Amino acid sequence: MLRGKMARSSQMSQFAIPDLNPEQMAAVSAPPGPVLIVAGPGSGKTRVLTARVAYLIANLGIPPWQIMAVTFTNKAAREMKERLQKLLGTDAERITVGTFHAIGAGILRRYGEAIGLSPHFAIYDESDQLALVKQAMAELGLDEKRVSARSILNGISNAKAKYITPDRLRLRATTPWEQRLAQVYDKYEELLQQNNALDFDDLLLRCVQLFELNPTVLEQLQDRYRHVLVDEYQDTDHLQYLFLRHLAARHRNITVVGDPDQSIFRWRHAEIRNILRFQEDYPDALVFKLEENYRSTKRILEAALAVIRANRMRIEKQLWTRNPEGPPIFLFEAADERDEADFVSSQVAGLLSRKECRPGDIAVMYRVNAQSRALEEAFIRYGLKYHLVGAIRFYERKEIKDVIAFLRVIDNPFDSLSLERVVTNSPVGQGIGARTWENVLHWSQTTSTHLLEACRQLAESGPKGLAGRTRQALRSIVELFDRLKALADSLSLPELIDKTLELSGYRDWLRDGTEEGEERWQNVQELRTVAQDYGGVPASQALSLFLQNLSLISDADTIRESGETSFMMTLHSAKGLEFPVVFIVGLEEGLLPHSRSMDDIEELEEERRLFYVGVTRAKRLLYLVYAARRTIYGYTEPSAPSRFLADIPKNLLHRAAFPSSPQLAGFKKEADDPGLQTLTFRPGDRVAHRTFGEGTVTAARLVNGDEEVTVLFPGRGQKVLLARYANLVHLDPERNKIL
DNA sequence: GCGCTTTGATTTTTT
DNA sequence: ATCAAAGCGC
């Protein structure tokens, strides 16, 4: 007893709790048991969660391996690991930190055999799922023109998210549509099983199933993970809820952190009521509220509060900040989306030329991705650098999916979708068309062997009518995978990838000499680089783990923090980020709130939360922009300002004018740099621009220490550019010398 | 089996 | 306006 106490107190000194305010401190050092931390934006919630993990280990002497910390994104998991590393050193490695899905996949790899899963299961993403639904529908003789595969998949996803099995769905089905849905769902599950594959939802659903069917396994896990901590609890769905409830049922040491006001994934089955009802689930829960905001100015916070106050589904908080009042929030009415983009660009150019911030301090946020187009064009016109966040996902690139398909087949020959991808999308399938492929599928069905085996049998002993060319093509596919499979035992993973690319002819096929081909090849090399982490052991051992981890990673969209580029992103992808300067554009009825969300009160509340999330990303400067008319799908229509704008008290807003810059009282630094004093362009000069080509200067003047040049580009019209950003090149330097 | 034309849909996307 | 998937002809 005494020894234990001494050990604890000596450990306590090892962990110096970082500066925390009293609320944060209370949450961090709350005794084990159910704990709910309601954390406002910018209140240091991740810090608190991390500090609590450290506290449990260092101060309460809990072994690191008894702790599980769950996040939603890989990025959040990574950040938490890094912070724990700093706080605890090597102890941190033994803590289980990961996303729901990664942790679920890990559990299934380890214990899945109890419910009939091979540890080599593939993880199917949404496009794989859709392909599987189509296959299921085809096998059931359902016409895709009458029921879209998409809507069926939605139905299946909804059922899965609610933990409804095909059997249960069939029992509760009343309409013909529901009966058909249950039928396809059933078939879909059968196909997953055949392919030895799981979809994303399965990673949690099957865990819950495992827990319910195998009390021994569940107990083992409960005793292993005695302390569970969850980030972003407001975004958990029903499966995640069940997963956590089971895991924490025995020891009830569950800490959740979240903010119902920032719940924006309802459409992804997130259930805001999970956090609203936490106290009902755990009546003895200790509740802490983090209400001090360290991020935004008083004005920005006040505007945010005014916006969110109108919602009903909330836990009331008294947010406050010690930060300064700050400049007013700028409100600008643009004529249309082009004008809007011009306004944003000119403001950005102004902020940068006045050195009020760095490009990386600025983010432009919008409701739908389509809005980025006009903004990008304007940024390019102004010579401003930007980075589109979350637009292209690495894992979804065609070439990456192709290479992964090869590897998946090597790892799991039952994965028919991947083999199909190889055959239809790469040089390997040369000479095999839809007809032949149907034969293979059919053969595989009748002999119930996997597809590769079906190819082999057809090549060797298929019907006489089979053309020699087809036979040869099938044989070469089988030989390719036989060779690769054999090589997997002796080569490391990166080497196996090299061999795969070489032997399949994929490398030469991809690098077709075009610039695009080379870029795609670079991406493939990127994938190879990732594989190097798994290089220590033979590929046959590393492959499953590599593939499963890969399926769970989506963020090659990791923000590059060079500071030299500004950011554009949807309001959804802005969650969890913060920027000194934020522009929210397209604040119009129909866009925000989106027209598809306007007839449902709960969806409207979510739109409002989305706006709230956007506003609370801003630290110092916030611009709210809307356009009087907007072109959508080729139709130009007048638009009304968003109803959410009306909730912001007028005294916080300042109507911005265009094109002159607003006065940024309190922010404007005294310019040491007087900027440009003389003109370098004059009317008549011939100049070249990166995107507009050659043109003639029609006017030039000094504006805020920069040179504003008006150029007439033949065929593209007159453009007003800032010389500092536009990188205009003089075409006839001789003439310039005369100046 | 491949390439061109038509058709339809088009919010958000942590995994 | 734009893009992808399906449809159709060679």
Image (tube, coloured by chain):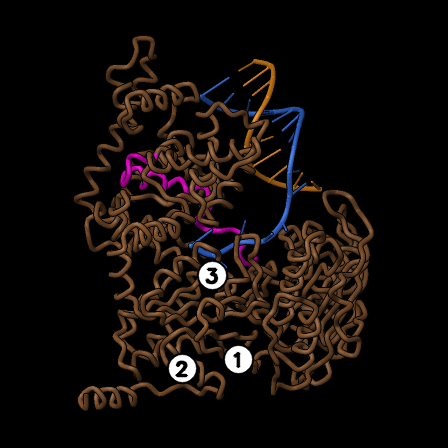
Chain colours: A brown, B blue, C orange
Is A390 covered by the magenta stretch?
Answer: yes
Do badges 1 and 3 share one subunit?
yes
Image spot of residue A511 (x, y percent) = 41, 39
Depth check: A75 or A593 in front? Answer: A593
Nearer to us of marks 1 and 3 is 1
Which residue in the structure is indicated by mark 2?
A: A30
Few, some or many residues within 10 Å of mark 1 (<14, 14–19, 20+) = many
Amino acid type of the residue tagged 3 in the rendering: Thr
Q: Which quarter of the rendering shows the N terminus of chain A?
A: bottom left
Few, some or many residues within 10 Å of mark 3 (<14, 14–19, 20+) = few
Amino acid type of the residue tagged 2 in the rendering: Ala
Chain letter of mark 2 equals A
Label 1 sits on a secondary structure element that is strand
Using the rendered image of the protein, determine whether residue A735 is visible from the camera's viewpoint.
yes
Using the rendered image of the protein, determine whether residue A688 is visible from the camera's viewpoint.
no
Q: Which badge, 1 or 3, is on the more N-terminal residue?
A: 1
Residues in magenta? A388-415
Which residue in the structure is indicated by mark 1?
A: A290
Rendered residue at 26%/31% (across/down): A480
Label 2 sits on a secondary structure element that is loop
- The prevailing secondary structure element of the residues shown in magenta is helix
Q: Which quarter of the rendering shows the C terminus of chain A?
A: bottom right
Tell me: A138 left or right of A306: left
Which residue in the structure is indicated by mark 3?
A: A558
Q: How far apart are marks 1 and 3 (CA)?
A: 28 Å
Q: Which badge, 2 or 3, is on the more N-terminal residue?
A: 2
Q: Distance between the residues labelled 1 and 2?
A: 14 Å
Q: Which badge, 1 or 2, is on the more N-terminal residue?
A: 2
Indicate whether A445 appears above or below A715.
above
